[in-house]
Image (spheres, helix red, strand yellow):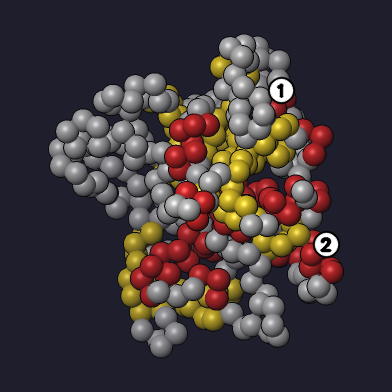
Amino acid sequence: MSQLSLVASAMSSILDIPVKTYDECVANEYTISPEQILDINFVHTISLMHVKNEVNEVEDTFFTFTTSNLIQIFVVNLSGDSQAIFIDPYNTVLELKYTIQEKFDFDIRLIRLEFANKRLEDHKTLKSYNIQHGNSVHVSLRLLGGIEPKNYYVIKKDFLDPKYDFDFTDLEDDGKKHYRGQRELYRRPYGWNRIALNVSGKYGHDNRWLGYHGDSPYEWPVSYHGTNRMCFDPIAEEGYRLDKGKRILYGKGIYSTPMIEVAEIYSKAFMHNGVSYKAVFQNRVGPGFNRHYPLGFITNYEYWVTPDEKNIRPYGLCVKKTLSVFRMFH
């Protein structure tokens, strides 16, 4: 089984945009432009959901959002009508596209956005384009040439780092303790196949954060992050229903967990060669994360909140086979 092909299928599901391997594109004589090449920085920006809105403690079953960090922009659709949207300027263009998809029922794969006569790139933030309160963003349709639409991403072999792959599929926890980052317990992803992403040089030249000695002050601990965009507040919402409807958000940031079985709850299933899989990101988490435990009866769950997205770095994709819906009911 090709690891790259499997990762392409996983990324297609996670990003909701087709991802193809470079060899597949060459074999089918598809044209590849530089902006279609998928890199780890784009994956970092898009796949790690950042809870940016503040939530107040409330006694009912609804979240109360504040708009202190939001700006109002106007989205001009294909017919020239405009609709106001409140959004965080630090959101990416792709996140804005998801909002537009919900409001206008457009296929996200077929739309492009423009501001000040400039086409907006998915991985960049609105702030990077100096989009401010009251500005208008225009929606246009992608032109589809020939049979194969040009709205897809491409991954090359250097997207992965096979020398760091480790297949935990058939391994079981033997009780031995493993540590990363100043004696932080590393819960290995037993039952999963960890495919290493190539992060060499992506976060500077100092790679000591990826150490494996367990007691180094430069190492970062290991966490896991779900991949299901439908749970936009991944992990964050779990537990808030457990104390008579009271919900207390742990703060703004990226939510992850040192327990892969928790992240799996928020993972997204995908199909590859007729087999159903699940995928979870394996990360290293730097200084400044906050530990939290949900209220109620699920007391052994642990969640980490990283306020600064620079301090959480995906370096592996954990995948495992799972029962498909068809097999479950037949």
Quadrant assignment, res 28: bottom right
Residue 23 is labelled as: 2
Q: Which of 27 and 77 is in front in this view?
A: 27
Between disc 2 and disc 1, the foreground one is 2
> x and y percent of residue 63 in the render?
24, 46
Q: Mark 1 points at which residue?
A: 211
Q: Residue at x 53, y 46 (%)?
A: 323
Looking at the image, the residue that sits furthest to the front is: 330
State the residue at coordinates (61%, 14%): 174
> Does 274 appear above or below 302?
below
Where disc 1 sits, the SS reads: loop
**Dot 2: what SS?**
helix
Q: How far apart are marks 2 and 1 (CA)?
A: 32 Å
How many tags in the picture? Answer: 2
Q: Can residue 11 be seen in this view?
A: no
Residue 299 is left or right of residue 316, and the answer is left
Q: Which residue is drawn at 67% across and 36% down?
A: 193
The tag earlier along the polypeptide, 2 or 1, is: 2
